[in-house]
Image: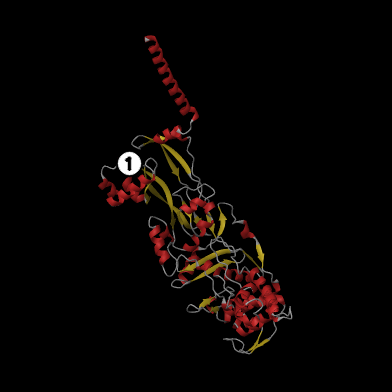
Amino acid sequence: MDNNRKYILQFAIILVGLIYCIKLFQIQFLDDTYGPAAEDNILRKIRDYSYRGVIYDKKGRLLVHNDPVFDLMVVPRQASVKDTTRFCSLLNITREDFIVRMETAREFDLFQPSVFMKMLSMKDFARFQDFLVDYPGFYPQARSLRGYNHSSMANALGYVGEISKRMLENDTTGSYKQGDYIGISGLELEYEKELKGQNGVKYKMVNVRGVEKGPFKEGKRDTLSVAGLNLTATIDLDLQQYGEWLMEGLAGGAVALDPQTGEVLSIISSPSYDPASLSGRRFSENFAELTMDSLKPLFNRAIMSVYPPGSTFKPLQALIALQEGVIQPREQIFCSGGLVGDHAPAGYYDVFKAIKMSSNNYFYIVFKRIINQELSPNTFIDSRLGLEKWNEYLRGFGLGQPVGIDIPNEKGGQIPSPQLYNRIYGEDRWKWSTINSISIGQGEISISPLQMANFAAAIANKGYFYTPHIIKEIGNTGKPRPEYLTKHYVGIDTVHFAPVIDAMESVVNEGTGFRAQIPGIKVCGKTGTSQNPHGEDHSVL
């Protein structure tokens, strides 16, 4: 019996040892969950945030840069704050605020780091840094925020914010994590892919108190961050600031284009805001205030607001009529002044005089000739066919649709079509006389300040335009996106532009646009007043 007991005991010891060996073999070689779990107790994974690309104006002046800040991270399981009063004093927070932040961190994860306090400035962090060793479980995470040397063109530049839960769910690239910053509007959103760069990661050894003891495996597992690409804008900062000064106290938009390239030299939305107000710890507070502002400073009027063009639309009507051959440049048309309200006196008008004097009656007659070309004996069908042809010309000038500028949320305005009037009046129940208000840029037609500048550029080029764009160089390519290097022809023969351009020059030299005169420079233009059913009429140039 004694021998049997001895053998049984030996067998039990061997069996237990064998079980432990098998389990250890499984943990060491077969199961990959235990290794990382063990490493998590001695490792701290720190994201190395990349710097976003900066943005310059066309003369190399910095518009948007990066300001270094620090997020104070906490690992609740390792955190120890013996003197809460001093801790709160260093960070300028209340004890109640401290308790809430710690409870939030614990609810997130006891063992994983989370943000205790966001966006400490260099000055605030420097005050706290010397005491950091006294607070195990807390460590800094370096990152950057957008900074601005000037308060100009906020609506065009846009802003950066923390990625939302919905954005994160819709991210198909897998390159974003909770807490990352992303372009929300303007150029920051449009060029997010180019600006954002690529984040890296660093692994640090820590002891049981959470104090860093150096890089893990000499940094062999670390990956470096890659900075985003810099952008060079087409904007001339001097012109931009001058335009914003002119628009101060007014509501509206203005765009200046270089017709030879499509480069946007200035893009103004008024009223606007200081872009620095949407960068930093007061982002949410400032954003809510801007959103509630009745003047809508976040609304980019240069590309999102649309207005009836009024008399500025008349040069375009003249070009279509000349191309269609329904008028001749020197043809004299008698305007009695009784067809429609007019500030131009009765008399004979040709293209030059009609544009210079802004004769409503002349363009009332011209538009009828465009629409009713006797393409059908049925007046209603004839008007529909004529309007379809007229609509095609306008779309050739980039109207009735977004022109494609490199800022999100551009509005296309409205160019009336047969389908629109069929919905309003019924199919083939309208004709030229029903819709004649669009002959002078009123009624159902609306365009944005950007579109107005673009069709003026097409007139300056005598028949073509480049898609307007704000970025002229991405990185060191020396070029914008390829789509901004293509000419778009409007479908009007070059010969028809001369009388229209001469008339527009006369408007500035001798007419209502005299305030646009620049000594030594040939300036062409057209003024207009568009009716506004919601208040005072809009002025257009």
Q: How many marks?
A: 1
Q: Is residue 50 left or right of 343 when viewed as pictured?
A: left
The answer to which of 259 and 145 lies nearer the viewer is 145
Q: Position of residue 447 (x, y in %)?
A: 57, 71
Quadrant of the image containing the N terminus: top left
Q: Is residue 77 left or right of 237 when viewed as pictured?
A: left
Q: Amino acid at mark 1?
A: Ala
Residue drawn at x 32%, y 41% as measured from the top left: 79
Callout 1 crowding tier (Cα within 10 Å): few <14, some 14–19, many ≥20: some
Q: Indicate the quadrant where residue 521 lies.
A: bottom right
Whether residue 37 is visible: yes
Q: Position of residue 104 (x, y in %)?
A: 35, 48
Q: Position of residue 4 (x, y in %)?
A: 40, 11
Residue that label 1 marks: 79
- Mark 1 residue element: loop
The answer to which of 370 and 246 lies nearer the viewer is 370
The answer to which of 470 and 162 lies nearer the viewer is 162
Q: Position of residue 96 (x, y in %)?
A: 28, 51
Quadrant of the image containing the C terminus: bottom right
Q: Is residue 401 left or right of 38 when viewed as pictured?
A: right
Whether residue 359 is visible: no
Where 317 falls versus 80 (above or below)? below
Where 238 falls versus 21 (above or below)? below
Residue at the extreme front: 1
The answer to which of 428 and 72 lies nearer the viewer is 428
